[in-house]
């Protein structure tokens, strides 16, 4: 399925939308699925998540630090059948670049591998994040204890904070669908499976590495996890060829579509949130950064 004449983003659950995509028609899947942290799961509710993020704290923990062993298992169960669809629509030798939260990236990796892909590497998008750890003094002060006891506890803590260093990276899982024959045989048949490092977008004077430094985008365009277009262009240029089809099953605010168009690729995108899908489609049409 190519895009419709008037829409770059299909406003539909990708699990339904991908069923209409022809087998072996996509060269690259570049996507940022739900992370299954703090409500960012398959019941994604943009307004509810924004409300949580504004507060910054959930259940006494910074956003992203609400630990639940079920998170990883739920992510795996959600992503594996999605990745099985990826395996059907992608060409032999085609690449998957899947963003994931570092804490649950092992579950996402397992889901993609168990769907039939070969895990090739782990990349890291490097950025300057905001420190989220905080001291416990406030919670101690709220306890029903004598003041001198509270002071003693706070002094014993020595300013220690919740276990969260300043975030400076996001994981990108690099997977590849099984090739047909050798690298050369596969390339001649499908133009996939090999990478182009001749003209990288990021750090042009260096051979592309697994750590990719790109600042976070200033404008989110209504989506809390927007990715910078230069980063996506960098990945698209390396892992696909001009004229090929790039698919983003979780298109969000449309940054992958913009990057694909700027790099001369066709694009298929799915986004379940109608408000975000409209923003994404408009951005792609005008090529907004």
Image (spheres, helix red, strand yellow):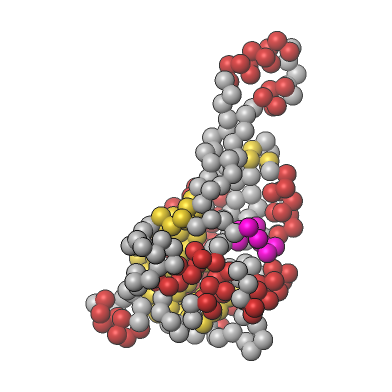
Between residues 103 and 170, which one lies in front from this camera angle?
Answer: 170
- Residue 186 lies, with reference to residue 254, above or below; the image says below
Residue lying at the far front in this picture: please name it: 205
Instruction: Report the residue that reaches farthest toward the bottom.
Output: 5
Residue at 73% across, 69% down: 275
Q: Is residue 97 visible?
A: yes
| Residue at (33, 62) in percent of width and height | 207
> Which secondary structure type mostly characterizes the magenta part of the structure?
loop
Q: Could you tell me residue 220's position as x and y percent? A: 65, 61
In the image, 61: left or right of 233?
right
**Is 234 situated above or below 151?**
below
Residue 100 placed where, x, y %?
50, 56
Across and down, in percent, residue 103 comes to 50, 47
Q: Quadrant of residue 118?
A: bottom left
Q: Quadrant of the C terminus?
A: bottom right
Q: Which residues are magenta?
A: 218-226
Give yes or no for residue 109 being in the magenta stretch.
no
Check the picture and name the quadrant holding the N terminus.
bottom right
Left or right side of 182 for 287:
right
Return the residue nearer the eye: 230 or 42. 230
Vertical position of residue 171 compared to residue 234: above or below? above
Q: Residue at x 59, y 24 (%)?
A: 159
The structure residue drawn at horizontal position 70% and vertical position 27%, both measured from the top left corner, is 138
């Amino acid at each position: 399925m190519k895009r419709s004449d008037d829409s770059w983003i299909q406003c539909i659950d990708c699990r339904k939308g991908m069923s209409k995509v022809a087998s072996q028609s996509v060269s690259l899947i570049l996507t940022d699925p739900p992370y299954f942290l703090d409500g960012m799961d398959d019941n994604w509710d943009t307004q509810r998540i924004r409300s949580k993020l504004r507060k910054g704290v959930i259940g006494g923990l910074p956003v992203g630090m609400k630990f639940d062993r079920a998170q990883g298992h739920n992510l795996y169960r959600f992503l594996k059948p999605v990745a099985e669809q990826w395996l059907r629509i992608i060409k032999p030798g085609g690449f998957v670049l899947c963003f994931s939260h570092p804490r649950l990236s092992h579950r996402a990796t397992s889901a993609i591998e168990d769907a039939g892909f070969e895990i090739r590497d782990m990349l890291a998008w490097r950025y300057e994040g905001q420190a989220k750890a905080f001291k416990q003094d406030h919670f101690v002060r709220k306890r029903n204890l004598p003041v001198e006891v509270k002071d003693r506890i706070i002094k014993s803590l020595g300013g220690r904070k919740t276990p969260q260093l300043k975030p400076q990276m996001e994981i990108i899982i690099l997977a590849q669908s099984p090739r047909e024959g050798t690298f050369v045989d596969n390339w001649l048949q499908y133009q996939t499976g090999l990478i182009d490092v001749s003209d990288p977008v990021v750090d042009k004077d260096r051979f592309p590495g697994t750590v990719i430094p790109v600042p976070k985008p200033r404008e989110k365009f209504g989506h809390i996890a927007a990715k910078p277009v230069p980063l996506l262009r960098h990945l698209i240029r390396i892992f696909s060829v001009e004229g090929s089809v790039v698919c983003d099953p979780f298109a969000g605010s449309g940054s992958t579509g913009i990057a694909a168009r700027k790099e001369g690729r066709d694009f298929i995108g799915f986004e379940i949130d109608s408000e975000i899908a409209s923003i994404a489609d408009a951005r792609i049409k005008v090529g907004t950064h």
